[in-house]
Amino acid sequence: MPKNIEDFESKIRYFFRHLFSIIQAFPYISAIVFFLIVFVLSASSGNLAKAFAAIGTISAVIWALYHQEIKHYLDRPNLQIENINLDYPYFRPVEHSLFDIDYYINIPLINNGKRTATNCTPILYSIYENKSDDKWEKIQNWIPLPLQWAADEREFEDVIIEGETQTVKRKIARAERNIVPNRPYFFNLGMFDVGKSIVNLCQFVLLTFPQLKAQTNSYSEGHFCYQVKIIAEEIEPLIKYFYLKWCWPDCKIAPSTKPKIIIWEIKDNPP
């Protein structure tokens, strides 16, 4: 086969692959553009009845051939994170003792679609810190890790004890969950660890798992931005940026004292 013919076929294949990828990414816009082209071509002959008949016929054929795929797409999972204020239940204390209190930041996640989002995982993807002169710097060498679920439904696993004849059950945490429609779920961004250290009266601890020794998960007062990516099957990743600036208002630990939130914002864009 001559080389120019091979080049032509390669360009044709590339064009149709690119066209199909655009249709998959923008199905509604592609359908509107297609119907407009059919309507204009049919109406150019001066017969509007034929134009509407052509659109109706093509629509019926498409629905007959692809109605299951169309319905499957329309009923796809749709995960959303609402903009929340740091108040109960999103910002709640857990008291271990009179001077040992943890304050958790719980992020609500809801599926507004019609099908279950399977194997959903919130991942802390990257961290930015606002340095002096209002200059943001990305923390280098951060390894993305899953965040813990706030109300963790744990699976049971069989464990064989060495040297024993019995089998016991133990609970193991899991990063993935199936998010059913219209039920609220929560995952932990982190917690304020109060009263466990004399040097740092309060630290913000990122609740990731596993916790890696090669990178810190505890931060003192400052202004940070946390990029969280929610992944699941059959959805585009949901990406949100959580801006948090806080300080500890008192030099002493008191039961009524809690971290002071200066900035709390949820945005779609990085700093």
Image (cartoon, grey):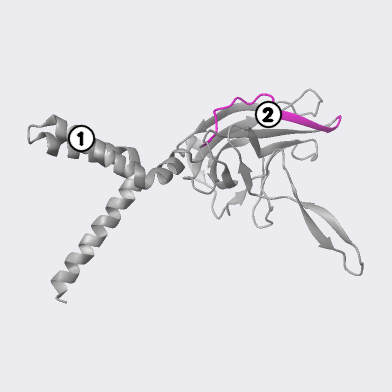
Q: Residues within 10 Å of mark 1 (few under 14, many from 20)?
A: few
Is 36 placed left or right of 217 in the picture?
A: left
- Name the side, left or right, on which 33 lies relative to 46: right
Q: Nearer the viewer, residue 195 or 211?
A: 211
Where, quadrant-wise, is the N terminus in this rendering?
A: bottom left
- Taking the image as shown, residue 73 lies to the left or right of residue 259, namely left
Element carrying mark 2: strand
Q: Position of residue 100 (x, y in %)?
A: 82, 34
Give the residue type that dot 2 points to.
Phe
Task: Relative to 4, say whether 264 is above or below.
Answer: above
Q: Nearer the viewer, residue 265 or 187?
A: 187
Label disc, if present, on residue 91 of the rendered structure? 2
Q: Which residues are magenta?
A: 79-98
Q: Quadrant of residue 187?
A: top right
- Residue 53 got which mark? 1
Residue 91 part of the magenta segment: yes
Q: Is residue 198 visible?
A: yes
Residue type indicated by callout 1? Ala
Residue 31 coordinates in the image, percent (x, y) = 29, 39
CB contact under 8 Å: marks 1 and 2 = no
Residue most toward the left?
45
Q: Which one is in front in this view, the residue at disc 1 or the one at disc 2?
A: 1
Q: Is residue 33 visible?
A: no
Give the residue drawn at x 80%, y 39%: 198
